[in-house]
Image (cartoon, rainbow, N blue to C red):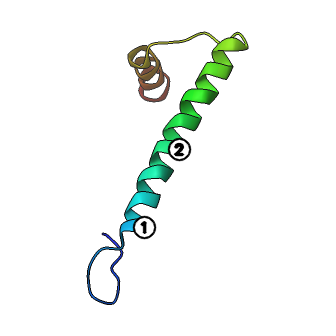
Amino acid sequence: MYKLCETGKPLIPYLHADKFARINRIDQAIYESEQDIANGAEAVDAEIVFVELEKKHFG
């Protein structure tokens, strides 16, 4: 739910702050992934990972 000011209208700065916080988290995740790849990590398909996790935990 949006934060409201005394008049009951949404406070625009809060909306923008939330949006920028989400974008920043996405940018941080992309940056960390790029660093992992640069340091020799191997990219994997998420579907394969989930199949392997399901096998491991649910047989």
Query: What mark, if any, has residue 14 been given in the picture?
Result: 1
Q: Which residue matches tag 2?
A: 24
- What's under tag 2, amino acid-wise? Asn
21 left or right of 16 in image: right
Question: Residue at position x 36%, y 67% from top?
Answer: 12
Query: Of helix, strand and loop, which one carries label 1?
Result: helix
Quarter of the image with the N terminus in it: bottom left
Name of the residue lying farthest toward the right: 39
- Residue 48, given in percent of the width and then of the height, sits at 42, 14
- Residue 8, given in percent of the width and then of the height, sits at 26, 84
Query: What mark, if any, has residue 27 been given in the picture?
Result: none
Q: Do the residues under discs 2 and 1 have CB atoms within 8 angstroms?
A: no
The residue carrying pointer 1 sits among few (fewer than 14), some (14 to 19) or many (20 or more) residues within 10 Å by Cα, namely: few
Q: Quadrant of residue 5?
A: bottom left
In this orientation, which residue lies closer to the viewer: 37 or 12? 12
Does 55 appear above or below 3? above
The residue carrying pointer 2 sits among few (fewer than 14), some (14 to 19) or many (20 or more) residues within 10 Å by Cα, namely: few
Q: Earlier in the sequence, mark 2 or mark 1?
A: 1
